[in-house]
Amino acid sequence: MATNPTQIELIQPDDWHLHIRDGEVMKDVLADTARQFARAIIMPNLKPPVTTVDLANAYHARIQEKLKALGINSFTPLMTLYLTDNTSADEVRKANVAGIAAFKLYPAGATTNSDAGVTDLKHCHDALEAMQAVGMPLLVHGEVTSSEIDIFDREAVFIDQVLEPLRQDFPELKIVFEHITTLQAAHYVRDAATGGKNTIGATITPQHLLMNRNAIFSGGIRPHHYCLPVLKREEHRIALLEAATSANPRFFLGTDSAPHSKGAKETACGCAGCYSAFNALGLYAEAFESVGKLDKLEGFASFFGPDFYSLPRNTKKITLVKQAQSIPHELPLGDATIVPLRAGETIAWSLA
Ligand code: DOR
Ligand code: ZN
């Protein structure tokens, strides 16, 4: 690849961590994602959460209906179930047979719609054992929830208090440490001993590759830069960028694009989540280019995710061009609007 390419061709990427919500807004956000990605792991934190195979099947049918209405037949949603204190081993086995891609662990109270999440992993022993037995991945929101722990430390503390003990107890369980935000998480995943097995991965969002915590406060409070886990110091951003561009197959693309209406973000107690789906690939290309590693984008975006999930890689190719794209100030979101990441600014790369 030329040192300063003006276009790059890659196998079509997938998004291994995505929120599309439900109802009318789903149509708007699905269109943005399906323009770029072939598949996406669909997060189950709806209200009420998607805790059973039956609920996931019904959600899948609603997604297919919206895709059909949009005339999209090239996008595959990969469904997940929300782990609770009461998830049974039977439900895990049923999910495996039904083709559910993964379970999601939200520590209760950690983030948007996580109240029904797990209060203590000791309640999940049977379900975790069943996941390990059938090879069902567990996707982890890796933050402790205790209010005594500083919000900027919650991910690092989670590694010691929850993740490492979990991996000791279930050494063969496939775990994805989702949307990692710290040097500690990047190094933990990089250095984890797995006996040569494919048992640990991590997703990284575009916002955590491009911004540090100053972005939440630059010139005033910036609600559209608030997500969970929250942006961290620059040293962490650099460690994440290093991990993402290292060609280590444990690190792959997951936008965590999390739509909330403009009104729900710009308020006294705004929701957590960045809407990156509008031009997520352009954002990732910018991040990789910033360290001269555009040649490492395809592995991260298109190969390592399916490899981890034991799914075939996509075969279709897409082209990204270095052509500045203006990002609108607002986009339609059902009967409201949404402010996308980088609203009113430009992104250097866009889909051809
Ligand atoms: O910022 C976030 N938004 N982090 C999460 O973990 C959940 C997500 C959402 O669903 O809005
Ligand atoms: Zn998420």
Image (cartoon, grey):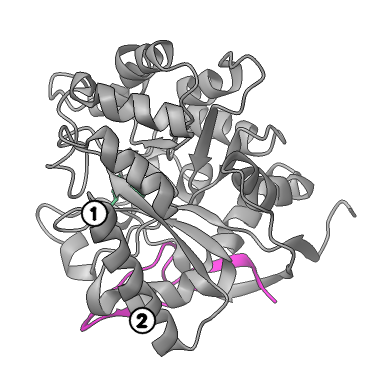
Q: Are marks 2 and 1 in contact (CB under 8 Å)?
A: no
Indicate the quadrant where residue 332 lies: bottom left
Identify the disc placed on residue 65.
2
| Percent position of residue 341, x then y | 42, 62
Using the image, determine if residue 129 lies above or below residue 34: above
SS for dot 1: loop
The one of 115 and 236 positioned closer to us in this rendering:
115
Earlier-in-chain disc, 2 versus 1: 1
Identify the disc placed on residue 135.
none
How far apart are the two marked residues, 2 and 1, measured between alpha carbons?
18 Å
The one of 187 and 220 positioned closer to us in this rendering:
187
Residue in view at x 15 percent, y 58 percent: 47
SS for dot 2: helix
Residue under numbered circle 1: 50
Q: Is residue 330 among what the camera can see? A: no
| Percent position of residue 281, x then y | 59, 61
Residue in view at x 16 percent, y 32 percent: 85
Question: Are there few (<14), some (14-19), or many (20+) residues within 10 Å of tag 2?
Answer: few
Q: Is residue 230 left or right of residue 251?
A: left
Count of picture labels? 2
Q: Is residue 340 among what the camera can see? A: yes
